[in-house]
Image: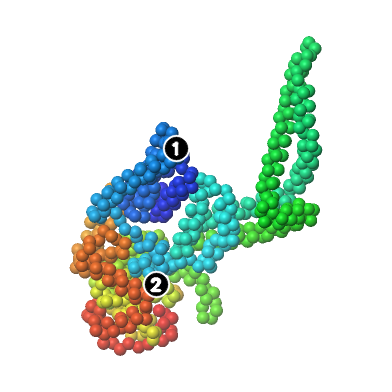
Amino acid sequence: YMVAAWGGYIFVLNMVGVHALLLVLMGRFTDQIYTAYSLFYLIGTFLAVQIPVVGWAPLKSLEQLGPCLIFLGYQGLQLTEVIRKQKNFSRAQSWKLRLLVASVGLLLLVVTVTIVAPSGYFGPLSSRVRGLFVRHTKTGNPLVDSVAEHQPASNKAYFQYLHHICLLAPVGYATIFFHLGDASSFLLGWGAATYFFSSKMVRLVLLLAPIGSICGGIAAGRLLRWCIIQLWDAAAKSEDDDASTTTTKKKAGGVQKTKAKKIVAKPTKTKKGGGKGSKNNLKKQAEQEEEDDDDIFESAELLSDKNKYYNPNNPLTPARKAIDTLLSSNEGIMLKRTFAVLLLLLGYVTAHSFKDYSWRLSKELSHPSIIVPARTRQGQVIKVDDYRQAYWWLRDNTPQDSRILAWWDYGYQIAGIANRTTIADGNTWNHEHIALLGRTLTSNLKEGHRIARHLADYVLIWTGGGGDDVAKSPHMRRIANSVYRFLCPNDPTCRSFGIDQTGRPTPMMEQSLLFQLHSTGLVPGVEADKNRFKLVKQTKNGKVRIFKILSVSHESKRWVSENRVCDDGGWFCPGQYPPALQKILKEKKDFAQLEDFNRRRDGKENADAEYTQQYLENLNNPEKARRAAAANAEKNPPRDLSNTNNNNKKLRKLTEDEMAIM
């Protein structure tokens, strides 16, 4: 179920594998552990490969091969255990057998990998996983680097999502170390892994929340138990003191009393008819003797433990005695009870605050974030509902087969609220497709229209300032350039596309389709070609603009509809580009990950390495990259600006109002 519903199943799979390995290192490997993990892996993998979009990834992807190796290791370890028990090996013989089996297994593994790896069987680590181990925005993949949720979590983020759990969870986590077992060791691994990953990527606080709640509950439960003992165990403690006094008196003559009882317990002759009563008496006497013996042994054990605790060779013994004496006194008992009362009151206030905060946060996270409060320049608080109304307009005023071209961030909202097909959404598995979308939006108006007319019927753009599409457009250009390298020649970070230091758009940005549609009619001198795009909807507060694409290629639309390809179960339907876009697609260079060791070592691979190296250098030194981009733009103007009518238009600095619109 988790494999079919959530890509995060990889984390769950690896956590179970890490726990299985941890149990072996702790010396807790048993037949039950072996059976449980083997069944989990076999059944889980069998079901996972049935999901078409997953396929054989559990046996090919480096992200999922760890649990597979642990499964194979379990088989070898179980084999050694069976042989050891059958032949009754000594400890030394057992270790020799384990080393032999491990060596043979490692040799077979190396041979298998050596044979299979050259064929490209194994998949590389994805950039998303690599982003967990390197600094945010420096994974080498501009698509991954552009996502704000991939930034590290701050202290504020932890408290925002976990609240008082931030204080209780560490206490509960530390408590687990004193109660280690097969189950509790899983909590240790889970907590350490999720905290590490959440510190690297804020979105993974989601994984930290369950273990944080568990550890917080452990801490709260321990504190509550201690408070209850202090307040309600007084009577029991008094009875224990009385019993202890009685036991002490018994110890003084316990041995003599026991001997006397044994002597008395000798069988004597009884009168006829008194046999039953005599047997009962003997039984009671025997039970009493056992109780007295138990008292003697229990007392000896307590005395032994006390002697260990108060070891005279321990330098802390005097301090321990002093503390115990203080806490056992009437004043110490009253102090503990007072502290318990204060702790309960504080716990009640904290719990009440935590409950209210949790309900408030759940409402905030559950309510649609596309409806937000805002304040006008006059100080009036209004409700900004532009995004939802734009999606409803699409739903109510466009044909059902309409295709909407928008940046992938809004894909799910368009599909879910407007019920219209979107060109891309958050399922960004296809890097090259997102790059084509980025090229369409950041190319000049003419070239962008030439691509868009074969893909969509409408263009939806977020406007109105803040994190709108113009603010995101430099990332779009970087992503597009990672596949279409000529868009920003010798400039992987596309510094020539954006807002310069004087507050005006660079020539490349000003002539882009996105900027033209975003600012047409709002910024003086910016007017989109009305023969290519028609403004059909602008929301009340100007947050969203929708343009109808004119001269849509109905031939391409019909071809895509008639050539839809899906797998047998209908799980996965990879899109098909119409023939009219083949000329554009031939210009692309598939993006290669740094970790893809299956790439052939040829000139193309070296070019990818140089591109990635320059990309990372530009990120590390943005000022140098900006100067180099400016010099390069003068020598080599970008190709997609060569056929525009506005090349010679004089640029000017935008006014504050125009910048606010952007």
Residue at 45%, 60% in the rendered image: 197
Q: Position of residue 434 (x, y in %)?
A: 31, 66
Instruction: Please state which amino acid type lies under the numbered disc 1.
Output: Ser
Q: Image height check: is 543 above or below 579?
A: below
How dense is the environment of label 1, judged by Cα within 10 Å: few (below 14), some, or many (20 and up)? few
Instruction: Please state, as top left, top right, bottom left or bottom right, where the C terminus lies in the image.
Output: bottom left
Residue sitting at x 30%, y 81%:
629
Viewer-closest of 557 and 473: 473
Q: Is residue 23 left or right of residue 449?
A: right
* Residue at the extreme top of the image, as rendered: 272
Give me the disc on residue 90: 1
Q: Residue beneath label 2, please?
A: 462
Q: Amino acid at mark 2?
A: Trp
The image quarter containing residue 77 is: top left
Asked if one can make out residue 431 in the rendered structure from this viewpoint, the answer is no
Give the alpha-carbon distance from disc 2 to disc 1, as whole Å: 73 Å
The answer to whether mark 2 and mark 1 are in CB contact below 8 A is no
**Could you say which quadrant of the image residue 531 lies in?**
bottom left
Precedes in sequence: disc 2 or disc 1: 1
Question: From what the image shows, is residue 658 above or below residue 483?
Answer: below
